[in-house]
Image (cartoon, rainbow, N blue to C red):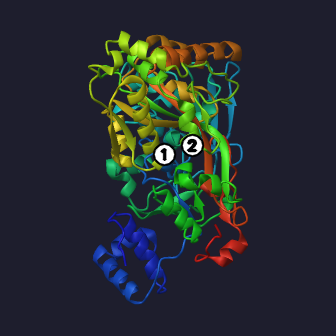
Amino acid sequence: MNFPTAMPWNFPGMARRLLAQFGLRVAAENFTRLFPRWLFVLVLAFSVGCGIRERPADLVIINGPEPESLDPAIQTGQADGRVVGSLFEGLTRYNSVTANPEPGLAERWEISPDNRTYTFFLRTNAAWSTGEPITADDVVYSWLRLLKPETGCEYVGLLFYIKNAEAFNSHSTSDPTRVGVRALDARILRVELEGPTAFFLDLCATPTLAVVPRATIEKFGDRWLMVWPLPVSGAYQLESWRLNDKIRLRKNPRYWDAANTQSEVVDLLPCTLASTALNLYQTGAADIVWDKELVPNELLDVVLKRSDFHAFNYLGTYFFRFNVTRKPFDDPRVRKALALAINKRRLVEKFARAGESVADHYVPDGTGDYHAPAGLGYDPAEARRLLAEAGFPGGKNFPPFHYLYNANGKIHEQIALELKEMWKQELGLNLDLRKLEWKVYLTTQSKTDFDLCRSSWIGDYNDPNTFLDMFMGNNGNNRTGWKNARYDQFVREGNQQADPVAREKLLRTAEQILVKEELPIVPLYFYAGCNYWDPGKIQGISNNIRDEHPIRVIRKTAASRRIGLGETRTP
């Protein structure tokens, strides 16, 4: 038997369940006092000898790379967010069909006539999984925690639409009572915004703004996620997290909408190899596989014809970043030269092939009612002219440089190799490739320790702001070293503009600076999503432009549950 990674919260839960199988039931509050850890080891050893096995999950999902963190304030990746969104909830949550915001911990809200003040009314049955009520003060604490620089939240900019939130984050004010979020009583929260923010309810549904347990965090500090039982506000509790094995979630019976949580036990498996993911699915060891990167690229044309493989459009852009703090990438002419020498259509036709489209701007087509400006396009002759003007004719004297990308997903390496070839052929440049494992890649990117870096962004909500605000100078997701006061001003004014025509004009001007004038990033293509699951056996998944699929609504059909594991799917 493989023992789980040693985490304090895992021992009592496992021991209580093992003892229950022998007819011994112990209340949670008495367990630590009655059963020391050494006794649990004896119980576990006895259970192994008696042949007791862990209950199979009701639902098994291949979730991509191992999450970096399950702290809503720290998580950044899509794999992290899926788990965090199941454990912790915010004032709103995503609708499982449309991905639009709907009531979450707040059952309703009122918006002032000037669209600057929101009053949220929390549910009377909103409670932590440990039984204590979730209050408006918990929301205030959670959001102020995000704003504290020492928390290290890269998505802190999501709160900057709140009055004085940015000033508090930058220490322009140290008084938290000046931040426009306050509890009027235990169930009523008042939020004051800097200006009208059409997507504020969308922000409240993001995993980052979820409500977290103050008492646990203040008592245990950075180790709060290792506490058992972990108080959660979402549809699922964290039963165990075995690194490089699985995360097991169990239905939270105290969740306000527990009656509609469809699966009792859900396992999320880390996997970054497409061949492994497909094999697990084909043999019935997994029910759902998220992410196009887990479809073998060489089989893409074949599997997309199957009824259990689903392609769809969603708000995502594949691009790479420059580190503009390093020479010669501090020169916009160099950045433009590299961008103009890329045949993006060739990249899409050779490697993407699931319906992706060439991106010469950053905000995906179809985002809200926004129409993005055109970028630079493909012009190798102009690229050579700019590179020569910058002092590197034919690539002469251009310093060594590297392209950083993550190991999971074969397509990243394929694109990196193709870029290397294009820049060698068109500009005479020699590119080194630097491949890192997922967590190391994320850390390296966050530290801006690269020349060029493979990147992608999936919209948090259906508005151009979710793409454009990340490259403001103070945004933790910028990761380029680039700051432009004009860009920041246009985005700020656009965010606070109530008139949609005037707002679009401001944001288009900002994006033109980003993709045509300055180019701290180079968009390559817009994503098309692809996941696989059998619609005859799985219910509750609705593909949408946010690629948002809440686990709480997903379940196996009754017929599928009777079949169980061991079935092999026909290719």
Residue 352: image tag: 2
The local crowd at label 1, few if under 14, some if 14 to 19, many if 20 or more residues have their Cα within 10 Å, is some
Residue 448 visible in this rendered orientation of the protein: yes
The residue under label 1 is: 411
- Name the image quarter holding the N terminus: bottom left
Please give left or right for residue 348 compared with residue 109 in the image.
Answer: left
Say whether residue 369 is left or right of residue 203: right
Q: Position of residue 139 (x, y in %)?
A: 51, 39
525 vs 170, nearest the viewer: 525
Q: For the point 59% across and 63% down, which residue is it?
A: 253
Q: Which of 65 and 9 lies nearest the eye of the viewer?
A: 65
**Label 1–label 2 contact, CB within 8 A:** yes
Total labels: the figure holds: 2
Q: CA distance from mark 1 to mark 2?
A: 8 Å
Tell me, yes or no, if residue 140 can be seen here: no
The amino acid marked with disc number 1 is: Ile
